[in-house]
Amino acid sequence: MVAPDTLVAIGNGRLKDKKLNGNGTTTWTWSVTSPINSYDIIPYIGKYTNWTTVFKGEKGNLDCSFWVLDYHLEKAKPQFMQADTMLRAFEYWMGPYPFYEDGYKLVEAPHLGMEHQSNVAYGNHFANGYLGRDLSTTGWGLKWDFIIVHESGHEWFGNNITDKDAADMWIHEGFTNYTETLYTTYLYGVEAGNDYVIGTRKNIRNDKPIIGVYGVNKEGSGDMYYKGGNMLHIIRQIVGDSAFRGMLRGLQKTFYHQTVTTQQVEEYMSNYAHKDFSKIFDQYLRSTRIPVLSYQSSGDIISYRWSNCVKGFNMPVKVFIGGAREQWITPTDEWQTIPASNGGQLILGSSGGNDPAHMAVGDTGNGMAGDGNFSVDRNFYILVRKQG
């Protein structure tokens, strides 16, 4: 890149050469050694100043470089310290940062944010949240800088693992949306992370399928962010944190620096967990319907089934029956029964003042949907309907 001598030019990867041309310009030569998406290539030119740190990560020392306009240096330095915490959290959940050879850079830009590989664009005004807002409205999203976390999460999903077709863009955005939850969980605990991802559900529109049209460079619904993240949250509930972490790390290792399809990701996750997730992917990626768990109470028996779902939908869910401890059931589109631990007598109080006949999970005061006789763990993005 050629820029005036008074300015700094920053590219992807590492600086290989800086040459004064003797005519008022300077040539800056940057180089990447890893495969890179064309949309990730970016030059920045401005009155930049920088500082460097070393992150001691899973693959050794990672060179980190931070570039901001000189008059923002004082407020940028404490804010950008979050990059170290981000790297530590993401390496825990997803494995080593995928581009140790090219380093990690965070660069101030007039654009809000973009996952330029090894050269992440930052324009969030050195404040926590998303331009000062919490997209989950739970309070947890104001405890960290959205752009540092989200755009850096793309180094794992989007840059390391890239879709072969834009129709599968959820692989970039659904997983990266969920890195926000993983980061919150890493810093503040499981319930904080649960609060965060559940809080984002209000942003889901269910306007069209998340997977777009193949072969014509057509993305699907913007629900790929929040609905994609909530689908992954469901899978995490089903397999448990240890297996989910292993699954994420396995994806990064198996498809390292590769392009992939949704089918490959689906098959890997199902094979890893020894569970068939195909109907979950069909329901949340290829349909706009929110699955409904219908139930009835009759004497000492509770009946339940899935409705408003794809054919063969059989997602397991965690439920609470009367005063009993949590348990798992695997509904289908056919009625099944289970004993009511309280003899069929409704226990009041768990549904708050809300109508238990049809409510979204998370609507009730205790974070569950249903009533005192039958309720569902709040971590499942479904509707619950009482019949009869």
Image (cartoon, rainbow, N blue to C red):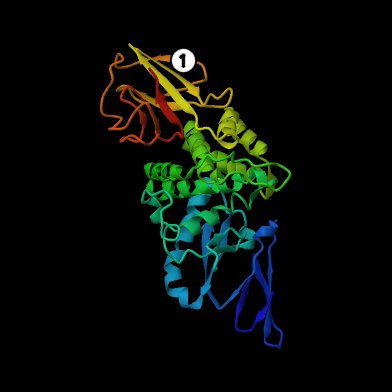
Quadrant in which residue 267 is drawn: top right
Label 1 packing within 10 angstroms: few (<14), some (14-19), many (20+):
some
* Position in image of residue 146 (x %, y %): 47, 56
Pick whichever, 128 or 291, lies toward us: 291
Pick whichever, 350 or 29, lies toward us: 350
Q: Is residue 27 visible?
A: yes
What residue would you read off at disc 1?
336
Report the side of 359 relative to 268 (left or right). Answer: left
Report the side of 86 relative to 219 (left or right). Answer: left
* Position in image of residue 32 (x %, y %): 68, 63
Q: Is residue 63 visible?
A: no
Q: Is residue 123 above or below residue 364?
A: below
* Position in image of residue 211 (x %, y %): 62, 40
Residue shown at 47% from the left, 78% from the top: 71
Residue shown at 41% from the left, 20% from the top: 295
Pick whichever, 212 or 139, lies toward us: 212
Report the side of 163 relative to 321 (left or right). Answer: right
Residue shown at 62% from the left, 35% from the top: 266
Q: Is residue 151 above or below residue 388?
A: below
Amino acid under disc 1: Gln
* Position in image of residue 344 (x %, y %): 31, 15
Quadrant in which residue 288 is drawn: top right
Q: What quarter of the picture does the N terminus occupy?
A: bottom right
| Count of marks, rendered view | 1
Q: Residue furthest top?
A: 299
Secondary element at image label 1: strand
Q: Residue furthest right?
A: 215
Pick whichever, 128 or 153, lies toward us: 128
Q: What quarter of the picture does the C terminus occupy?
A: top left
